[in-house]
Amino acid sequence: MNNLEVINTEWLDSMASTKKEFLTKLFSVFIRDEPARVLKIREALESKQMDELKYLAHSLKGAAATMGADRVRKACLDLEYSARDEDEEQALNNILTLEIEMKLVYDFMTEFIQ
């Protein structure tokens, strides 16, 4: 996953050059709302609700793709597959990766907003 950027620079440059104010709002909403979804993802795994886990991973994957957060999108895809396969051990590994990647995205977005 290291070959992917935290936020896709081509996407970011394109958005920042024409829609910086909109992008700042998007990032603010993502930082405000997504930690709750990540918490729900962890709770779904802990309660072994694999269908819910798959759904939440899929929805976060879409949000991440919209934000140019390619590494989070990839982590969500991996998590979605492990949930679909009901592989709890792999899902836990995928969640740990997702949480790390989300922190990097939050940090990037927070710095961008300031």
Image (cartoon, grey):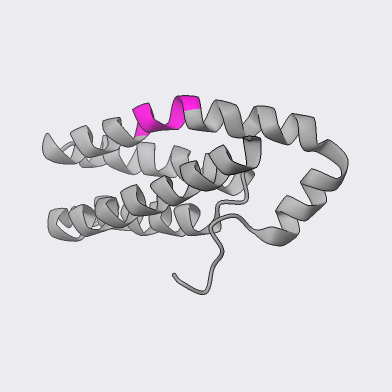
114 left or right of 43? right
Residue positioned most to the bottom: 3
Residue at x-position 64% and y-position 58%: 8
Quadrant for residue 34, please give it.
Answer: top left
Spot occupied by residue 56 in the image (x, y as percentages of width and height): 37, 37
Spot occupied by residue 89 in the image (x, y as percentages of width and height): 13, 58
Quadrant for residue 60, please give it.
Answer: top left
Give 7 or 55, whichever is nearer the viewer. Answer: 7
Residue positioned most to the front: 114
46 left or right of 56? left
Q: Which residues are magenta?
A: 32-37
Quadrant for residue 63, please give it.
Answer: top right
Quarter occupied by the C terminus: top right
Residue at x-position 55% and y-position 57%: 70
Quarter occupied by the N terminus: bottom left
Give 62 or 5, whichever is nearer the viewer. Answer: 5
